[in-house]
Amino acid sequence: MYQHMDLQGQPLPYAVGKVVCVGRSYKDHAAELNNPVPEEPLLFIKPSTSLTGLDAPLLLPKGQGAVHHELEVALLIGRRLCHTEPGHALEAVVGVGLALDLTLRDVQDRLKAQGHPWERAKAFDGSCPITPFALPEVVNDLQRLDFSLRVNGEQRQDGNTAMMMWSIGELLAQMSRCFTLNPGDVVLTGTPRGVAELKPQDELDMQLNGQYRFSAKVAG
């Protein structure tokens, strides 16, 4: 069963909660999928059952079409946020890591064409593989974090949180006005361009801010 962990492999004292995600927070990602750029953050939720660590091979759903990787900076919330302001929102962040917003792209495209919600494509069990968390003060400025993904040695995604259309404080504040963020919740901040399909036995290498490197493998 998944548990939030620190970089030393020790459990963190937060119950596992929901995952709050934002779509199209990077204009280049919206453009690569021919999606319109939203005027406000496009929010959706993954349940706690979507979270999984990287210590075991990643299990991809079978028979549902392409599964795409979307690498994102992940924030662990340690304090309740409800109708908060951007200037105070960052104080609730107690951990920083990386996560993959795994997406059943064919399923999502079909749902979008029908005007239906995305949960079947985004919220399935194991759809949010996530790294251990570093302390925010160690990674310094959350709004200038480099992060990248290589698959089988090939550069796939490369981004920086400075490229986001909304600041992290603004995102957290807007999320808190829609639904309360509780300790143990995780926030995914969006993905840059370069999303692509994962295949069985793919080897993934993720880096955060030039300080931390994480690896994962897709099950065969």
Image (tube, grey):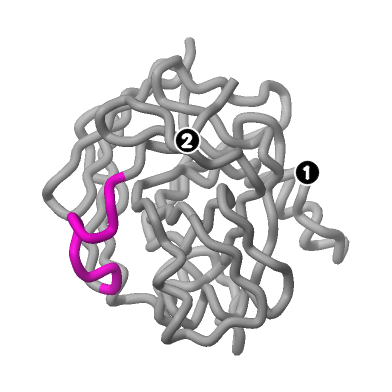
Numbered label attached to residue 25: none
C-alpha distance separating marks 1 and 2: 24 Å
> Which of the two discs, 1 and 2, sits closer to the camera?
2
Numbered label attached to residue 4: 2
- Which is nearer the eye, 152 or 125? 125
- The earlier-in-sequence mark between 1 and 2 is 2
Outermost residue, top side? 220
- Quadrant the N terminus occupies: top right
> As drawn, is 136 to the left or to the right of 153?
right
At x 56%, y 70%, the residue is 34
Q: Is residue 171 magenta?
A: no
At x 43%, y 60%, the residue is 191
> As drawn, is 191 to the left or to the right of 143?
right
- Residue 192 position (above or below residue 74): below
Dividing the picture into quarters, in which one does residue 192 lie? bottom left
Q: Amino acid at mark 2?
A: His
| Magenta: main secondary structure | helix
Q: Amino acid at mark 1?
A: Arg
At x 57%, y 53%, the residue is 183
Dividing the picture into quarters, in which one does residue 152 lie? top left
- Which is nearer the eye, 78 or 54? 78
- Which is nearer the eye, 113 or 135? 135
- Residue 85 position (above or below residue 147): below
- Find residue 62 and report its horizontal and vertical position in percent: 68, 21
* SS for dot 2: loop
Identify the residue under disc 1: 120
Outermost residue, left side? 210
- Find residue 146 and report its horizontal and vertical position in percent: 21, 60
Task: Look at the image and give the residue range highlighted in magenta.
Answer: 134-143
- Which is nearer the eye, 189 or 205? 189
**Callout 1 crowding tier (Cα within 10 Å): few <14, some 14–19, many ≥20:** few
- Residue 166 position (above or below residue 159): below
